[in-house]
Amino acid sequence: MSEILLSKSAYTHNLTQIANKIGSKDRIIAVLKDNAYGHGALLMGKIASEFGIKIACVKSEFEARELSELFDNIIVLSHLPNGNESGEFIYAINEIRALEIIKPKTQIHLAIDTLMHRNGINIDEIEEAISIIKERNLILKGAFTHFRASDEHGGDYFVQKDNFNTAKTKIKKIFKGELMFHSHNSAAIERSADIGDEYVRAGMAQFGYFGFNDSLGLKRVLTLYADRISSRVLRTGQSVGYGGVFTAKEDMNIATYDLGYGDGLLRYNGKGELYLANGKPILGKMSMDSFSSIDMGERICVFDNADIWAEFFGTINYDILVKLSPTIARRVVE
Ligand SMILES: *Cc1c(COP(=O)(O)O)cnc(C)c1O
């Protein structure tokens, strides 16, 4: 089999570092969307909840239901309004039209478009939005924005901070009532000197990968292992796997391990060198449910650092981790 081990101490360390940076664990929103970035939403959610996190953020109602016992509040980011929303969750409003459809008495957070132009209402739509909110008896609980380049040097981050401040001032002027404001994702938390009294949406930093700089001293949470299915001697001149793209230059002890692109790994096509955690390469093309390498015993570590795979495939570590199939066994270790 293959197995993912999840380090509880690394995860609580990362949450502690984030809490210390912003001055409170009460203002951390744990972003646990997409099965907690492939880690396992329920397992991570339990630890976060025990640690004292009260608010989570997910993609869909489906994901919110899975975590509903664990958190006081769950924000659903990508819900399509249908008039049948649950009273239990908080829904992000991604465009002004959503306010006309969403069920009365639903709790909402307004997404504000401050530059990314992906989701949210414009700053000059705030008055209109709040009058619809009042008219339709929606329960406004907060407002937020998302940075398009908090992980990059350059001015965008500061432009968006300014724009969000403008939005906040506008909202506070016309809406009396307690509101939660939030804008910082992981990279923004790392770089920000003044988060003020905002909440933060901590995503990847929870899992130990930094986006802007390693000022938080994060520790990686996930390690991926694969167990040996079989082993053999690959004789000089013999080739292993589909297409026979790796050929032995000398007799070698090889093994096939129980993990492939069907388990959510990106498919290695046998070209270039893709290294396992101990520095040994995968040999030949990856199969759907297995890959081959030199025989390294019953269990090998495939990666404890997704950056190695991300770099090889020209993508980001998020992409490597989030694809890890929910069907891989997962176990929390100290
Ligand atoms: C995914 C997401 C986050 C978390 O981003 P990280 O870079 O992983 O911290 C925060 N806010 C929104 C709206 C998101 O979609």
Image (spheres, rainbow, N blue to C red):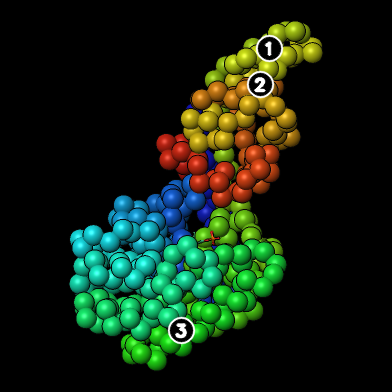
Name the kind of residue labelled 3 in the image. Answer: Lys
Q: Is residue 31 left or right of residue 245?
A: left
- Relative image position of residue 99 (x, y in whole percent): 28, 71
Q: How many numbered circles does the render carry? A: 3
The residue tagged 2 is 284
Q: Determine if residue 260 is in view.
A: yes
User: Where does the image place residue 108, in percent across and percent down from the top left?
Assistant: 32, 72
Q: Label 3, on which residue?
A: 168
CA separation in Å, label 2 and label 1:
8 Å
The structure residue drawn at horizontal position 43% and vertical position 55%, both measured from the top left corner, is 33
Badge 1 amino acid = Ser
- Residue 12 visible in the shown view: no
Image depth: mark 3 or mark 1 in front:
3
Could you tell me which residue is drawn at 62 percent across and 56 percent down? 209
Residue 152 vertical placement versus 319 (above, below): below
The label on residue 239 is 1
Secondary element at tag 3: helix
Q: Nearer the viewer, mark 2 or mark 3?
A: 3
Question: Is residue 291 shown above or below 30?
Answer: above
Of mark 2 and mark 3, the one earlier in the sequence is: 3
Q: State the SS at label 2.
A: loop
N-terminal of the pair, mark 3 or mark 1, is 3
Residue 17 is labelled as none
Q: Nearer the viewer, residue 285 or 167?
A: 167
- Asked whether the residues under the numbered discs 2 and 1 touch, taking CB atoms below 8 Å apart as contact, a structural biologist would say yes
